[in-house]
Amino acid sequence: MVVRYWDSSTNEFTTRYLTSMFLGHSTASDLLSAFTSSLCKLGLSVNKLIQISVDGPNVNLKFLSDCEKLVKGESTDTDVKEVIDIGTCSHLKKVYGSYKTAHMKSE
């Protein structure tokens, strides 16, 4: 599990490795359970998630869908209400390309 967050002390995004989960063959339910358990052990809240990156297999897409439902179901007025869905790894290239183009045009 790797997280990326805004570090107000350095005024920049920071990426940190948190933990690994070795599950072997598992279902989306197994992934969600391990994911939320790891967050809990680390003192992190699922309600503060903004985006989750996954690759293309259907189990991961089901995990993402289940996680979005969990975030919506447990959110309060001050929490994130929806996880940003930028798709699977093939979609990340499009998001990056769009961001790069917009950034270059704004210079």
Image (spheres, rainbow, N blue to C red):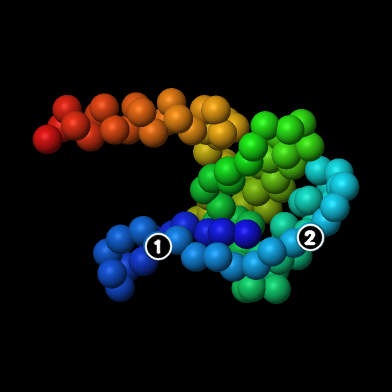
Q: Is residue 65 visible?
A: no
Other residues around mark 2 within 10 Å, as few (<14) / some (14–19) / many (≥20): few
* Residue picked out by circle 2: 22
Q: Can residue 92 be seen in this view?
A: yes
Give the residue furthest to the left. Answer: 107
Q: Is residue 48 left or right of residue 27?
A: left
Badge 1 marks a residue whose secondary structure is strand
Task: Looking at the picture, tell me which residue is in the foreground, 36 or 98.
Answer: 98
Q: Which residue is drawn at 65% across and 48% down?
A: 71
Q: Looking at the picture, how far across and down is residue 60, in whole percent?
A: 73, 39
| Mark sitting on residue 103 | none
Badge 2 marks a residue whose secondary structure is loop
* Residue picked out by circle 1: 14
Considering only vertical position in the picture, is 104 above or below 63? above
On the rendered image, what quadrant is the N terminus found in? bottom right
Q: Is residue 82 left or right of residue 96?
A: right
Task: Looking at the picture, tell me which residue is in the foreground, 75 or 58.
Answer: 58
Q: Looking at the picture, how far across and down is residue 75, in whole percent?
A: 62, 52
Task: Looking at the picture, tell me which residue is in the foreground, 1 or 71.
Answer: 1
Q: In the rendered structure, which amino acid carries the disc numbered 1?
A: Thr
Q: Looking at the picture, how far across and down is residue 13, in whole percent?
A: 36, 58
Other residues around mark 1 within 10 Å, as few (<14) / some (14–19) / many (≥20): few
Q: In which quarter of the image is residue 15?
A: bottom left
Q: In which quarter of the image is residue 17?
A: bottom right
Considering only vertical position in the picture, is 29 above or below 20? above
Task: Looking at the picture, tell me which residue is in the foreground, 19 or 46.
Answer: 19
